[in-house]
Image: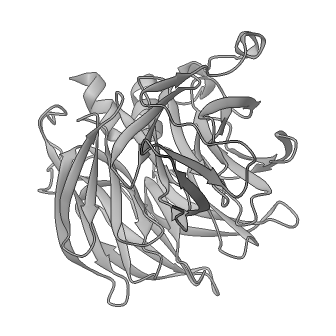
Amino acid sequence: MSVAGASPFAYIANLESNSVSVIDTATDTVTATVNVGIEPSGAAVSPDGTRVYVTNCMSNSVSVIDAVKNQVIDTVYVGSYPWGVAVSPDGTKVYVANTASNTISVIDTATNNVTATVKVGNLPYKIAVSPDGKKVYAVTSGIPPDYQGNVSVIDTATNNVTATVNVEKNPHGIAVSPDGTKVYVVNSNSYPYYKGTVSVIDTATNNVKATVNVGNLPHEIAVSPNGTRAYVAIDIPGGYSGKGNIDATSHTGAVDVIDTTKNEVIARVSVGNYPYEVAVTPDGNEVYVVNYGSNTTSIIDTATNKVNTTVPVGRSPTAVGIGPVIKSSSTIGLNGTSFLNPVYQTENQTNDTRMTANGGTADKQKRESVPTQASIPFLNSIWVLVAVLGAVAFVKKKN
């Protein structure tokens, strides 16, 4: 028998496990675990689904994973403390936000070499590419005393910053609408109140056209394929006054669902402890939410806005990237074994359960330089945790 396609895989970056969990979205099970660099913090999948790019914030590197073999095939060294990562729509470029260097690295996917470095604002955290590939949007979190955040707009043809859009304080997450007309920026507005908002930027004018109130201490955002919904990971849905400690081990987070036509929250879905990042499947039917404090991934049914499945992953998951639906043919043997043959490869795909792949060669590992908190000389250690890892990591380490 043959089938027309295969469900995409979700790739979860586990910060404290130094690994990536690979989830088959058809079965919602972990089918592989890939070792990468030190403290993986971001994940992005190429448009054809053949490569996964993972930023390792304490290795100053990007691990390039062969998605067919679930093996690291290259390591690209970038700026200091890389976090956010995005792939261009044509798959030829990868953009990496280097938080401590205040730069964006541009990687040529054909050679896995850095071909350009773009200077942006203070503490670039997350990054997104427009659907036409002509613009890159980098959110910068801001520094004391005002913590003013903004979005750097980069022309991909020239690798120059063409505009800077002010948003609110301590922005973390960013996403572009499927039609490219809007950019959504998550503002945590940190200490002492953590009042969460989402700034909606009109890409034609580079002006904020609306502000949506969401739960407290939001992190990341994802937009549905049809553009009608946006999903925001919320750490403290019940609010926080700024007084006393937050219990990072027991607090249940949520995902706020925004109606993008009305720019208002229409639903709130309880997930695990301290949700960090969200991603929507290509068909728009499910939302994957990584729960930093629970070591799990919650899977939300978008039709009901309820969690259908919770999948255990590695320690402190911080990022999720979901690949495309893979066009393929599959031959079912007499014993019921399925041999999946994606059209973009010549060898059979192997996704052995719980398979662990080596994360890079020894000589490359020796060249890695582990950054310290001194990489940002004007920041003390507490601010590094708050501004770079976010308040979740700060509170967890504090408690």
Q: Which residue occupies the foreground of this view, 335 or 353?
A: 335
Residue 120 vertical placement versus 390 (above, below): below
Rendered residue at 76%/14% (across/down): 367
Dividing the picture into quadrants, the one containing residue 195 is bottom left
Q: Specify whether residue 105 is in view.
A: yes
Q: Specify whether residue 214 is in view.
A: no
Q: Which residue is at the far front?
A: 334
Left/right of residue 235 with respect to residue 17 in the rendered view: left
Q: Which residue is at the far bottom?
A: 261
Q: Position of residue 112 (x, y in %)?
A: 82, 40
| The C terminus lies in quadrant | top left
Q: Which residue occupies the foreground of this view, 210 or 181?
A: 181
Left/right of residue 365 with respect to residue 354 in the rendered view: right
Q: Which residue occupies the foreground of this view, 282 or 250?
A: 282
Q: Which residue occupies the foreground of this view, 204 or 327?
A: 327
Residue 276 vertical placement versus 35 (above, below): below
Numbered label tally: 0
Residue 262 vertical placement versus 220 (above, below): below
Q: How is the image coloured?
A: one colour
Left/right of residue 160 with respect to residue 151 in the rendered view: right
Q: Position of residue 348 (x, y in %)?
A: 65, 42
Rendered residue at 76%/72% (across/down): 134
Q: Position of residue 28 (x, y in %)?
A: 33, 48
Q: Position of residue 145 (x, y in %)?
A: 46, 46
Rendered residue at 58%/84% (across/down): 179
Dividing the picture into quadrants, the one containing residue 61 is top right
